[in-house]
Amino acid sequence: MWNAVSNTAEYGGRTRSSKIIDQHVVDNMREVLKEVQNGNFAEEWMNEYHKGIPNLGKMRSDSQKETLEQVGKELRSMFVRK
């Protein structure tokens, strides 16, 4: 999925999703929206970007080790035409 979105969207998804998806999802979405509106997210992302995206790189690497990614990779390989 992450290949289909921008680096900015991926970073936002990876750093904010765990804050949003729980029993308080509406309130959490409002808090994240405030971070976007007040510029905090943009400032954080620009700092990350200018440092060479070290946190995003680690999150990408870590996600490749997750069971879901491993199974998905295996399943996709089964559908490749040879």
Image (tube, rainbow, N blue to C red):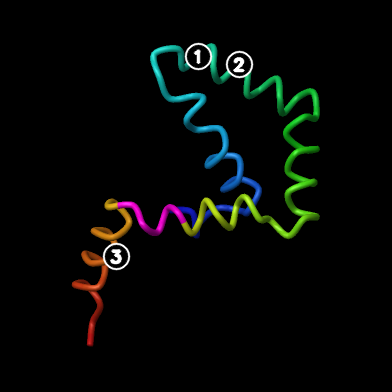
Q: Residue furthest bottom?
A: 82
The residue sitting at 73% across, 49% down in the picture is: 48
Crowding at mark 2 (Cα within 10 Å: few <14, some 14-19, many 20+): few
Residue on which the image places disc 1: 26
Q: Quadrant of the C terminus?
A: bottom left
- Picture mark count: 3
> Disc 1 marks which amino acid?
Val
Tell me where residue 36 appears, x and y as whole percent: 72, 28
Crowding at mark 1 (Cα within 10 Å: few <14, some 14-19, many 20+): few
> Disc 3 marks which amino acid?
Lys
Q: Are marks 2 and 3 in contact (CB under 8 Å)?
A: no
Numbered circle sitting on residue 73: 3
Q: What is the distance, in whole Å, between disc 2 and disc 3 at their CAs?
A: 34 Å
Mark 2: secondary structure: helix
The residue sitting at 61% across, 53% down in the picture is: 6
State the extent of the magenta-drawn residues as a range: 62-66
| Image-quadrant location for residue 81 | bottom left
Looking at the image, residue 20 sits to the left or right of residue 38; the answer is: left
> Disc 2 marks which amino acid?
Arg
